[in-house]
Amino acid sequence: MVSYSLRGGNYWLDNSFKQLVAEFEEKHDYLVYYAILSHTDIGRMLSLFYVSNREEEWSGDWKELNEGFQMSYVFNLDIPEYSEFGLIGFKPIFGGLIRTA
């Protein structure tokens, strides 16, 4: 089961978020293991933390994670056409994570 963080609190994905994750995993062959929900000026963003099945990428992924960055797919829940892959920044807070960049 995948959980997400909102303002540092951890929650289980609801059915609509589960559907987004399932479609993403099927389309890209990635495994989602966590998400951050952020409210921004351009909409609600669900940033998916995932791992690929390509082992040669894992060492780079670990390095980025340790530095507070993660390559993610970010769903803009309010303006879907703004959804995209990108490197996001994050930091731990209250037992969860918040997005910093």
Image (cartoon, rainbow, N blue to C red):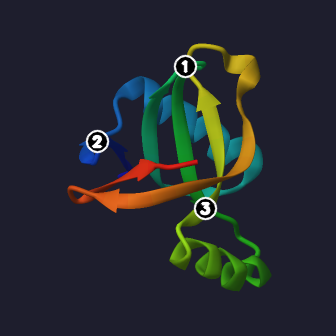
Q: Secondary structure at mark 1?
A: loop
Above or below, comparing residue 33 to residue 66 in the picture: above
Query: Is 87 on the left or on the right of 49, as rendered?
Result: right
Single out the residue that lies furthest toward the top.
Answer: 78
Residue 41's disc number: 1
Above or below, comparing residue 24 to residue 58 in the picture: above
Disc 1 to disc 2, C-alpha distance: 25 Å
Q: For the residues carrying marks 3 and 1, which lies nearer the camera in this image?
A: 1
Amino acid type at circle 3 is Gln
Disc 2 to disc 3, C-alpha distance: 20 Å
Q: Secondary structure at mark 3?
A: strand
Q: Quadrant of residue 74?
A: top right
Q: Where is residue 44 drawn, in percent x and y?
A: 50, 23
Disc 3 to disc 1, C-alpha distance: 22 Å
> What residue do we see at 51% from left, 35% from top?
46
> What residue do we see at 69% from left, 66% from top?
52
Query: Is 76 on the left or on the right of 12, as rendered?
Result: right
| Front one among 4 and 6 | 6
Q: Quadrant of residue 50?
A: bottom right
Q: Secondary structure at mark 2?
A: strand
Determine whether label 2 and label 3 are within 8 Å by CB.
no
> What residue do we see at 49% from left, 57% from top?
90
